[in-house]
Amino acid sequence: MSRACFCLVALVVLPVAVCAQPPAPLRDTSPQTGTAVIRGRVLVDGTDHALPRTQIKATSDKGRTYDANTDGDGRYELKQLPAGRYMVLASRSNYVAHTWGQKRPGGAGTRIDVADGQAIAAVDFKLMRAGVVTGRVVDEAGDAVTDVQVMPLRSQYNNGERRLFPAGRAASTNDLGEFRIFGLAPGRYYLSAMYRNMMGGDTDDRSGYGPTYYPGTGNMAQAERITIAAGQTIAGANFTLLPIRTVRVSGIALDAQGRPLGGSFISTMSRSMLGMGGGGTTVRPDGKFTVSGLTPGEYMLRTNMPGGGEAAMASVTVADSDINDVQLIVQKPPTIRGRVVLDDSAPAPKGSSLRFFLQADLPIMGGANAQVKDDFTFETTMAAGHARVTFFGGDWRLRTVRLDGADVTDAGFDVPPTGINGLIVELSARHADLSGTVVDANGAASRDYVVLIFPQNPEQWTRPNAVFTARPAGDGAFKLRVPGGDYYAVALEELEQGVASNDPDILGQLRDGAQRLSIADGETRSLVLKFSPPVVY
């Protein structure tokens, strides 16, 4: 057998850096109560049956949340609401959560404008019953396998590649090998069955089972999707686990002073499944560890200092042979230093008003916020690995990212354990102004839609901040700013929640019916768009 190929990246990050997120909006300090009221009723979709004990949440544009529960007749009332715009959501166990105004599960809802003292009635909901999938998991001999995790998944585009994302609650098989997944919204799903056979210990047993996708393949490209309607129960989604020879990964875990991290836990996460399929082992007193039962694939190994604190990560690619001498060493995270360069398209803002985000390619590795100083330099830390710059700064937009003279805007750049000096982030305020309205098939103006503006060159679709989206303002019109260029413009009734607007599969469907436009920096253009046919997710 050939020796396993592996790439080790010793990463250490502070707890806040591991799961860093883009900056949160400023907290709202306005009064929490007002004089407005929203009321309505909740029924089961397609019936006159009232739904008591349904939770109703109204969230304002300022981030305030107000809630209530329906009574025995399915009625609710949200009181003491301040004036503002609200999204109202109804949710109940075994039913599909619904945002008022949405046209399909997971779609965007419609905001409700509320004035002081106003009472808005008939904000009613009809909730669909959730779907169910049942089945059985057996081994190659046809015997039931217990404790297999069965997960519903959906394919989504993320960081330049298509991945399977969890799309609902998982289920574990019982003593008969049976599973039952409930609470599913209507839609199309993949199913994965994963036997958690990762274990500690230096065992010679190499038997195991690889991840299996319905109806019984280890290749995600050959997996079949299951279509579930509202309230539907699909039975007989059966799996036969695929036997496979497993691999053992061993190494040592040390702190920054080279002392054994005895007692700490090594967690093992599948990179292809976004951290699912976890398992691991406890580090022995001498710092050594062994994780057995790994099937071929890419994994992240991670350990924390006992009691929390700094962490170390390693990326391991498992093939068909054991991997030895992996080192997890707690070190300070690498530092990234650089400066921001502005063009002369607008008066320069104060440097400290700018902030951007370094996004790691692998979602489970997070990223880091970079706060710019008044002299337009910045310094931040993040886990070693591959990263891209994303920037959202009002009138300013990301133009180019350069490292050692090379343009890394699209490709991103590697962050080595030694850090980076001289990352150049170039920003521009040059833009074109687009505005417009959307009409339906009868020519009537719509007040509920999403507009996508995307480059005519498909090679640019996956570039950070290259696809622009807009929703209508209170007057029903949309407004947005884009860099000068050649674009397609489309209007959709909605874009399903969780779907990336730069997904090439989605944009490819929209291109043929899109409106073409060319616009230069400094130019203003008004559009009237018609709805495009719904896309297939």
Image (tube, rainbow, N blue to C red):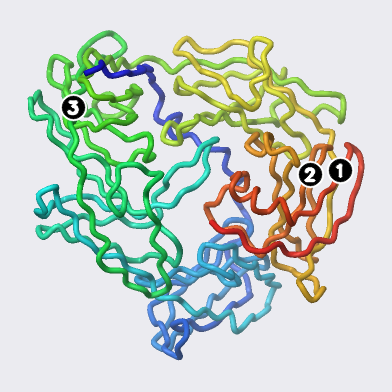
Disc 3 residue crowd, few under 14, some 14–19, many 20+, Cα 10 Å:
many
Mark 2–mark 1 CB contact (< 8 Å): yes
| Mark 3, residue position | 291
Of the residues shown, which amino acid type is indicated by label 2?
A: Tyr
Disc 2 residue crowd, few under 14, some 14–19, many 20+, Cα 10 Å:
many
Q: Residue at x 83, y 58 (%)?
A: 436
Of the residues shown, which amino acid type is indicated by label 3?
A: Val
Asked whether residue 517 appears in the rendered view, the answer is yes
Q: On screen, 21 above or below 338?
A: below
Of residues 381 and 219, the one nearer the viewer is: 219
Q: Residue at x 43, y 66 (%)?
A: 185
Of residues 289 and 115, the one nearer the viewer is: 289
Q: CA distance from mark 2 to mark 1?
A: 6 Å
Residue 448, how many percent across, how many down?
70, 67
| Mark 1, residue position | 518
Q: Residue 286 occupies which quadrant of the picture?
A: top left
Q: Residue at x 46, y 76 (%)?
A: 127
Of residues 228 and 368, the one nearer the viewer is: 228
